[in-house]
Image (cartoon, grey):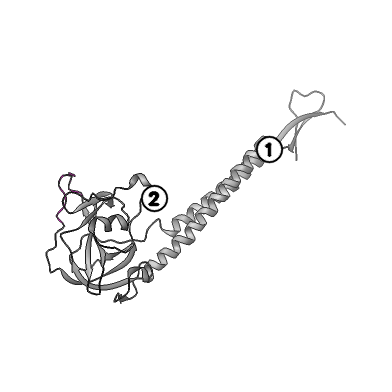
Amino acid sequence: MYRAGAPPDAPGGARLRLAHFAPRAGWTLLTLAGCALFVRLGFWQWHRWVMSDAVWTRFARGADAVQPLGERTLADLPLYQRVSVTGRLDGEHQFLLDNRSYRGRPGYEVLTPLTRAAGGVLLIDRGWVPFTGSRARLPDVGLAGEPAVTVSGRVADLPSAGLASGRAPPDPRGPWPKVTSFPSAQELAGVLGVPLPGRILLLDPAAPEGYVRDWQPPGLAPLRHLSYALQWWCFAALAVVVWAVMSVRRSRATQGPP
C-alpha cells in the first residue's frame, strides 16, 4: 500500500510513504495470550448459559402440576417439582436463615420442621422476613393456625454460600428460633435431633402461614450469561483488530524525478 505526496519543499522529487505489515513478536504474543483468555472466558460463559437455561426450564416445568409426596422422599423427585405433603408444623423449633435479602433489604428465611404423616421430618421454607434492625430482637415467626396442615411447594436445595467464610452453623445452645447462615442439612439435623433430607420445600406463594415468597431460579438469567459470552468474544476480535493496526509500519523513501 502506497501513498505519494509532493511537499512544496521537496526540490528534487516526491517523497513516497510506504506502509508495510511488520508485527512485533512481543505484541503478537501478548495479543495471542489475550485472545486465548477472552475466547476461553466466552466459552465458560457459554457453558454457564447452557446450564442456567436448563435450570430455568426445569424451574418453569416444575410448576406444571402438583404431585402428592406420599411415601417418597424429596430426593426421589426432580428439583423444583411442586409436591403436596401432609403433616404437623413444629413452630417451637424453627431456623432463621441469615444473610437473605429481598429487593436489597436484609432479612431471614424461615425454616419450619414438618413431621410428615407418612413418617419422617422435612423443612418447609415459609419465606422471607425483614431484619428487625437488631440482632437481639428476632422477628416473630410463630404459627397462628393449626399445626396439622397439607402444604404444597417446590423441591429445592438448601441455599449455599459458595465460600466457607459465609457459613455459620446453628448454635445447639440457646433459645429458638436459631439463627444460622448457609447451614448443611446435617448441621440442622444435629441441632433438631432428627434426621433431615438434604432438600427442603419452598412453600407456595398462595399457601397460608407464609411470608414473602417470590421464588426465583438460582443464579443469573440465562440471557445474561449469553450476553457475557458474546462480549468476551467481541473483545477477542477487537484485540486482533488492534494488533493488526498497530503492526502496520510506515517508512519514507525519496524518489527522484523521472
- Residue placed at 29% from the left, 63% from the top? 196
Residue 203: x, y in percent?
Answer: 25, 65
Q: Classify the position of the N terminus by image quarter.
A: top right
Label 1, on which residue? 247
Q: Amino acid at mark 1?
A: Ser
- Residue placed at 34% from the left, 63% from the top? 156
Residue 133, magenta (yes or no): yes
Q: Amino acid at mark 2?
A: Gly
The part of the image, by quadrant, that contains residue 109 is bottom left
Q: Nearer the viewer, mark 2 or mark 1?
A: 2
Q: Is residue 9 left or right of residue 63?
A: right
Q: Main secondary structure of the magenta part?
A: loop
- Residue placed at 33% from the left, 69% from the top? 74
User: Is 34 in front, or is 239?
Assistant: 34
Position of 193 relative to 78 (above/below): above
Residue 258: x, y in percent?
Answer: 88, 31
- Structural distance between the alpha carbons of marks 2 and 1: 44 Å
Q: Secondary structure at mark 2?
A: loop
Residue 203's tag is: none
Label 2, on which residue? 162
User: Is 64 in front, or is 69?
Assistant: 69
Residue 185: x, y in percent?
Answer: 31, 58
Magenta stretch bounds: 131-140
Q: Secondary structure at mark 1?
A: loop
